[in-house]
Amino acid sequence: MYKKLFFSAVFITLTLPVFFQSANAVTSDNVPAALAKAANDASVLDVDFLKEKINSSLGLTVVKVEKTAVPGIALLVTDQGLFYASYNGDFFIQGKLYSLGDKVTDIGEESLAKVRLTGLKTFKDDMIVYKAENEKYVVSVFTDITCGYCRKMHEQMADYNARGITFRYLAFPRSGINDKTGNLSQGFKELRSVWCSDNTAEALTKAKSGSGIAYRICQAPIEAQYNFGRQIGVSGTPAMILSNGMMIPGYQPPAKLEELLKNT
C-alpha cells in the first residue's frame, strides 16, 4: 500500500500543472484564533477550516471536501471545478491526481461523477429533450447556439435518435453570462430566448440552423446551468455527461457515440 501511495505522490509532482503554497497563509491576523490553531496540524482534516481557508485565500467556494488515498491531501469540489489541497490549506493543487495500482485511476473522477449526476437531477425538468423512440441510452449535453460542432451534432439528431440515443440539452453560453461591459452576453440572451419559447425543441433547432429566434425574457435557468457546468469541469461545448456521470468533451459522431455507450 505504501509503495502505491509513494508512486502516487511522485506522479502528482510530475503531472500536475499547478502545486503551490497558498499566498495568504493562515495567521492570527486574518483568521479566527480557532482556525489558526487548527492549521498547525496538517495530519487532521477539518472540513470547515479547509473550506474557510480556501475561500479566504483564493475566493473559491468549496462545495464538497473528501479525503484521498494520499496522506494529508483532500479533494475539493468547488464552484470553479475540482482541485486538491493539503489538510491545513497551505498547499493547493490544480490538475488531476492519479493512483498507480493495477491500473491508472483518476482519483477525482469518481467523486466528480457523483456530483454531476446529483446536479443533473436538479435540472431534469429544465432540459430540452430530443427523445429516441426506442430509447436505449440517455446523454445530457451542454450546448451553445454559436458552437459549430454543437450545430453539426444537432443536424444529426435523427441518426442519434434512430440508434436509441436520447439527447437532453443544458445551456452553456461559451461567452459567459456577461460581456466585457457587464451587460448580459449575446450568447446568454439567445439561449434564454430558446428556453423561454413555447416550443423549446423547435426553437433550438431553428436557432442552430441559423433561422433565428424571437427575443424572449423569462426566468430560464441559463445561469444556473452554466454555473453547474463550470463546477463539474465543462470548459467548452459540446460536453456530454453519460448515465454513469462520466464526461465526454467534444463532438461524437452517431456511430462512434453508440459504440462508446455500448461499452460504458
Image: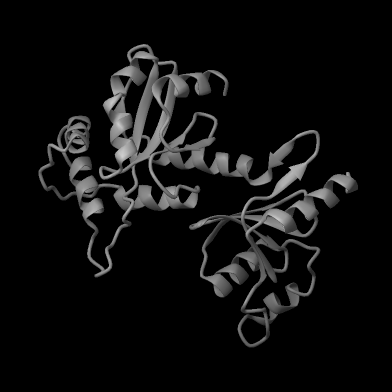
Image quarter where the N terminus lies is top right
Q: Position of residue 3 (x, y in %)?
A: 89, 47
Q: Is residue 36 left or right of residue 133?
A: right
Q: Position of residue 96 (x, y in %)?
A: 64, 50
Residue 49 in which image quadrant: bottom right
Q: Position of residue 116 (x, y in %)?
A: 50, 41
Q: Residue at x 20, y 48 (%)?
A: 190
Q: Residue at x 53, y 35 (%)?
A: 245
Q: Is residue 230 left or right of residue 145?
A: right
Image quarter where the C terminus lies is top right
Q: Nearer the viewer, residue 201 or 96?
A: 96
Q: How is the image coloured?
A: one colour
| Whether residue 23 is situated above or below residue 171 in the rendered picture | below
Q: Is residue 257 left or right of residue 156?
A: right
Q: Residue at x 43, y 25 (%)?
A: 138
Residue 170 in which image quadrant: top left
Q: Nearer the viewer, residue 28 or 5?
A: 5
Q: Position of residue 71 (x, y in %)?
A: 80, 56
Number of disc labels: 0
> Could one spot residue 70 in this view of the protein?
no
> Could one spot residue 86 in this view of the protein?
yes
Q: Residue at x 66, y 61 (%)?
A: 47
Q: Is residue 244 left or right of residue 159?
A: right
